[in-house]
Amino acid sequence: MAFNKRVKIKELLEKDYIGQEVTLMGWVRTKRSNKNVSFIALNDGSSITNFQIVADPNIINEELLKRATTGACLKIKGKIVASQGAGQQAELNAETIEVLGDADPEKYPLQPKKHSLEFLREIAHLRMRTNTFGAVFRVRHALAFAVHKYFNDKGFFYIHTPIITASDAEGAGETFKVTTLDLKKPPLNEDGSINFKEDFFERETNLTVSGQLEGELAAMGLADIYTFGPTFRAENSNTARHLAEFWMIEPEMAFYDAEDNQNLAEDFLKYVINYALENCKDDLEFLDKRAAEEENAKKADQRSELGLLERLRFVVENEFQRLTYTEAIDILKNSNHNKKKKFQYLVENWGVDLQSEHERYLVEKHFKKPVILTDYPKEIKAFYMRQNDDGKTVAAMDILFPGIGEIVGGSQREERLEKLTQRMEEMHIPTEEMWWYLDTRRFGSTPHAGFGLGFERLVLFVTGMGNIRDVIAFPRTPGHAEF
């Protein structure tokens, strides 16, 4: 069948193949016919652009052409010629067509019309055949590749941290348990609690919420490392911003302080977004138009001031504004937005956790550029963050983007054993179970820092999609684990 000799549509669009015989394979998007000829729009996933196939019924069997319905998969041989119509420079005159897979038009759910994103989530096993999701997942791939390229080119080492762990890095307690015990009849201790000594790992384990703690261990020997893997949060949040399974990028660097951390995070974000702008032009132009249509359907006061491509360039071309949490609270507290009670959550006291509306106000209204917020109150941050000399704040940083709020969270880590142990005791984190983590502070401790970026949050920003379930192939959310 010579499958390996097919030419991808992306290649046909980028190079001059006019006059050459080629083999194309792909799925029918649309077909229109008149008495003399059939026009088939074929897509093979390599590009958002379909390629036009011209099929003459005097050459191609009419019964065969009837099977070339939307969704059917075809293998087509023919000659590339200059296109007679507008919109495409070349087209293929079909000499032979083979149907690799039929799609009954009465049953195939993806017909040439606009389907809602909610409907497409119900058929997530087919939705990558649409223009929107083809574009989203090509952009997702480019971003993932850019992540690895950026860190590799900077001399970082890629570390695979465990998916099954006995520690909860965030102390959230919202973890998925991992067990081989019989849930109907688990072994019990004398006090009635479950005897995990009889479990596979002989202790209680769960799916990881972060690779950071293990990443810190690796940085204490390799200096500059990053993780990029799946993480899990058993948070019962059925919102457009939450997933139960998502991917995290977590670099960790020895010999970095808080400012070094901020510099790296800003440079990294600009690099990966610029990579997408340079390598996904057609897909991003399509997604930009799609996002504009969605914005136009909103009420005027809810519309974003910037289009998708404008937002991406806005991040790449602007220096990020840096300010402390304390400065941000003063700005928010004294803003007309707060005084006129336009915030859903009014900002009244120092120490409150900022909401997405506050973060977006700082970025979109006040500074009109991306923002790096630093030095948060220690009470609202994790145990491992380095305590500042004021005794009230920690060397944390969050990066805030337009339309989305927080996209990166990080900190300089607490490298001083006494301070770290004291903080863990204050937060009731058992130090005896974290002996391995504390060992990195006992033996050859050094200042180090790192940050975490939820990959889906990045893809959401770059593609302009409104729901995080639409930027991962098979979303896992409360009540949904299909496909």
Image (cartoon, grey):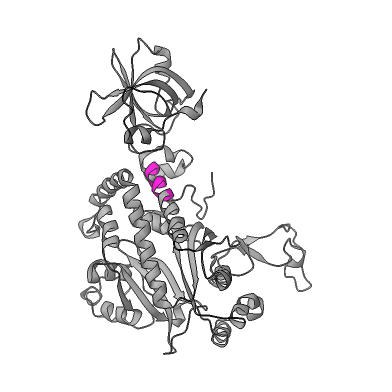
Q: Which residues are magenta?
A: 133-141
The reply to whether the magenta stretch includes residue 435 is: no
Residue 30: x %, y % from top left: 34, 28
Residue at position x 66%, y 76% from top? 433
Q: Is residue 38 above or below residue 407?
A: above
Relative side of 156 to 218, left or right: left
Can the viewer see residue 448 in this picture?
yes
Residue at position x 35%, y 53% from top? 275
The reply to whether the magenta stretch includes residue 135 is: yes
Relative side of 339 to 140, left or right: left
Front-most of residues 61 and 468: 61
Q: Quadrant of the C terminus?
A: top right
Residue at position x 72%, y 63% from top? 201
Q: How many marks?
A: 0
Main secondary structure type of the part rendered in magenta: helix
Residue 112: x %, y % from top left: 34, 32
Q: Residue furthest right?
A: 190
Front-most of residues 169 and 120: 169
Residue 57: x %, y % from top left: 35, 12
Q: Quadrant of residue 193?
A: bottom right
Can the viewer see residue 113 in this picture?
no
Front-most of residues 253 and 461: 253
Q: Quadrant of residue 348?
A: bottom left
Residue 44: x %, y % from top left: 41, 33
